[in-house]
Image (spheres, grey):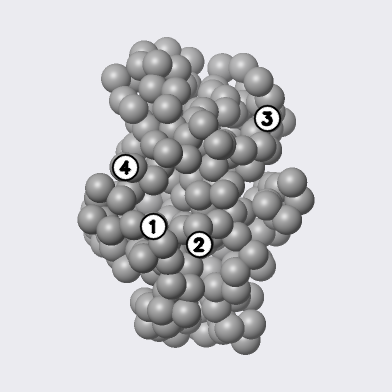
Amino acid sequence: MMNETNHTRGEPMDRIVYDLCGRDERLRFSPYCWRVRMAMAHKGLAYRTEPWRFQQKEKIAFANHDKVPVLVDGENVVTDSFEILRYLDRTYPEAPLLGEGQSYQRALFFKLFVERSVTPALFRIVVMDLLEAIHPEDRDYFRRTREANFKMRLEELHDPAQGREQLKKALVPVNALLEQSPFLDGEAPSGVDYLLFGSLMWAHVVSRETLFESDAPVAAWFDRMLGVHDGVAGKAPTVADV
């Protein structure tokens, strides 16, 4: 099994991020895993990734969880992307991601906005490309579980034009903010940027579909995000590469 090592502060063998992979192990597309990978880069923490597929539940059974990301940091095991970001802030307080008090509440609100407004729109745009990017042995599982959740076939959900219109409406306040600052968290990216970027990176990795108009502020922001932290996201393989 292929894994990736990120050479930054600390010993990478002490930290492992279990990370969703696709039909090619280089395809790492989980929006939640990308939140964590950007947060680790933000903190300057060394780690390695362990590729994981949808049905490899036994591989992360030690975490008492059945989804990734899972962070192993020495003796600590943390699940759920947002909780991992909170853990990183508590354990490595330099370069905060979410903050506390009012800052944390605003980040939590933005998390819910992304998950309930942005991600559903993206799913309509890329769902069939996503299915193709998944490992062949996982496709039946993915189809069965998602169609049960949505109560319709994936082919019925797939509507890129409607998804782009839905996404455009959801991103109206995001574009307004990005007209005033280069990143959502100000002059440099932080936790809120990674919450949105994770979902957009998910679509970017699995699909060649256009997500937004080229002159939209969010388009320029996304390009900037691909380049931050030594281009960790921009260097990631996409379906166009494999």
The mark nearer the N terminus, 2 or 1, is 2
Q: Which residue bears the numbered disc 3?
A: 4
Residue occupied by mark 2: 126
Q: Nearer the viewer, mark 2 or mark 1?
A: 1
* Real-space CA distance between mark 2 and mark 4, rounded to the nearest whole angstrom: 17 Å
- Give the quarter of the figure containing the N terminus: top right
Per the image, label 2 sits on a secondary structure element best described as: helix
Residue type, numbered disc 2: Val
Label located before the other in sequence (3 or 2): 3
Residue at the spot of label 4 = 145
Task: Give the alpha-carbon distance from disc 1 to disc 4, as whole Å.
Answer: 11 Å
* Residues packed near mark 4 inside 10 Å, few (<14), some (14 to 19) or many (20 plus): few
* Residue at disc 4, secondary structure: helix
Q: Could you tell me which residue is drawn at 76 percent across and 51 percent down?
A: 241
Could you say which disc has been placed on residue 154 in the image? 1
- Label count reads 4
* Sequence-first disc among 3 and 1: 3
Say whether marks 3 and 1 touch (CB < 8 Å): no
Q: Quick one: label 2 or label 4, which is nearer the N terminus?
A: 2
Give the residue at x 48% y 73%: 160
* Mark 4 residue type: Thr
